[in-house]
Amino acid sequence: MEVIACPDCDLMQEIPPLPPGGKARCSRCGETLAQRRVNPIDLPLALTIAAAIAFIVANTTPLMGLSAVGREASTTIFGGAMEMWQQGSQITAVAVAFCAVIAPGGHLLFLLTVLIAVRRPPAPRWVGEMLRSAHFLEPWSMTEVMMLGILVALFKIAQLATVLPGVGMFAAGGFIFLLGAVLVTFDVHEVWARIEWSDGTVPTPTPDTGTAGIAR
Amino acid sequence: MTAAAAPSAAGAGLVACRTCHQLTRPVSRATPGYCPRCGAALAWRRHHSIQYTWALVIAAAIFYIPANALPVLTTTALGSAESDTIIGGVIFLYTSGSWPLALIVLVASVMIPLGKLVVLAYLLIQVQRGVVKNRHESARMYRMVEFIGRWSMLDVFVDAFVVALVQLQPLMSVEPGPGVIFFMAVVVLTMMAAQTFDPRLLWDTPRERQAFDG
């Protein structure tokens, strides 16, 4: 039994030992408090490696090409941001590059490092810092929003020119599904339990919280 | 674990780490110190949550006006230039026969940012007045705002990729308009506002608030 406070409403409650695949919700606000994954480290690690490959392909091959009146043009994800920069919208260009390339790439790289590091517990403290950075980047990683944006852009351009989807487009589509699978299989709780404490304590399966006066 | 006599961690003198969720008895009430597990700074509630969120909401509301009034794309074809605002883009999609895409852009670019501002302002007013009427409903609204916010970035991506592809000088070219930067500012500021708002404030009773207000 472990006592935690709900991150959304601060209610203290005990988390019973969960069966594999089980989930505990906050009894007051309904927020998911804990989730036990069947294969908490190796499965998300394998998916993260696959997502990293899809991400590299998506960013290095042309996303789509366009031909109109005998002229051709093509772009990559980063090319979209570059063109914005050259047209004088530098701040927008930086935001597009951050949300479409830097945040998803950084998020994935941090998750990959964390998952490799926690395979042999206890992982050193910097792994926790990295996991915190990964959580920070998560909402800014917007590949799926970008894909919908590309769809709308394609429809707008289709009136003017012929558009051909490139390899990068399919890779980006694959990346979205793989990243989704990574996030669903990633077990934050299990990962934290494998990281060395900042005060030097070596993690135990059920950390003593030293709490008192908890209602049952 | 009954909801009626539910003690919050703060009410019991404990702080939950925002990063790793470890419960800790803090060093002192005034300065909670650092999480023994992950080393993150501990706080009873996010620092100046209400002020920061208000500041971001007001800034976003101001930017919302030029974001919708100024053009986001300027198309130059054979010497004649044409500017489109966000609503102009929605109308273009609708008239060219794709109402589903028009609806997606309308919802993502116009309704979601406005909805976020209204919901956050409503939650802030409730917390400030100290009476949260329907906590479950308010908590649900907050989660919705947090989850859906990123989809407003849609129009920025649309503009970026239209600009990147349609560069067929001298026949036709598309340039980003001044509205894009304001629109992007609205999206980024509202996302930050959702992050600075502390949802636990919705559940705190006046007695619990005393525990960390000192």
Image (spheres, rainbow, N blue to C red):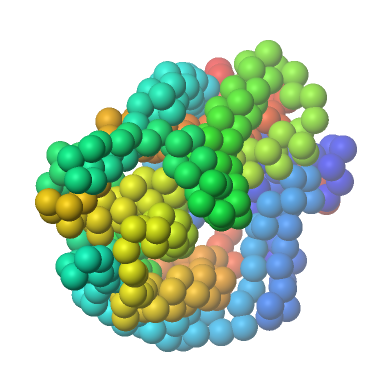
Q: Is residue A37 above or below residue B105?
A: below
B160 shown above or below A50:
above
Residue at screen point 80% across, 30% down: B134
Q: Is residue B200 left or right of residue A101?
A: right
Image coordinates of residue A11 in percent, x first then y, are: 70, 43
Q: Residue at x 84, y 42 (%)?
A: B3
| Image location (x, y in percent) of residue B109 | 50, 40
Task: Tell me: residue A196, above or below residue B137.
Answer: below
Viewer-closest of A44 and A75: A75
Who is closer to the viewer here, A195 or B152? Answer: B152
Q: Position of residue B175 (x, y in %)?
A: 23, 43
> Could you say which quadrant of the image residue B34 lies in?
top left
Q: Is residue A151 visible?
A: yes
Residue B46: % across, % down: 49, 32
Residue drawn at x 61%, y 77% is A37
In screen coordinates, is B158 left or right of B209? Answer: left
**Quarter of the rendering occupied by the N terminus of chain A:** bottom right
Residue depicted at 60% across the width and 32% down the height: B115
Q: Nearer the viewer, residue B126 or A59?
A: A59
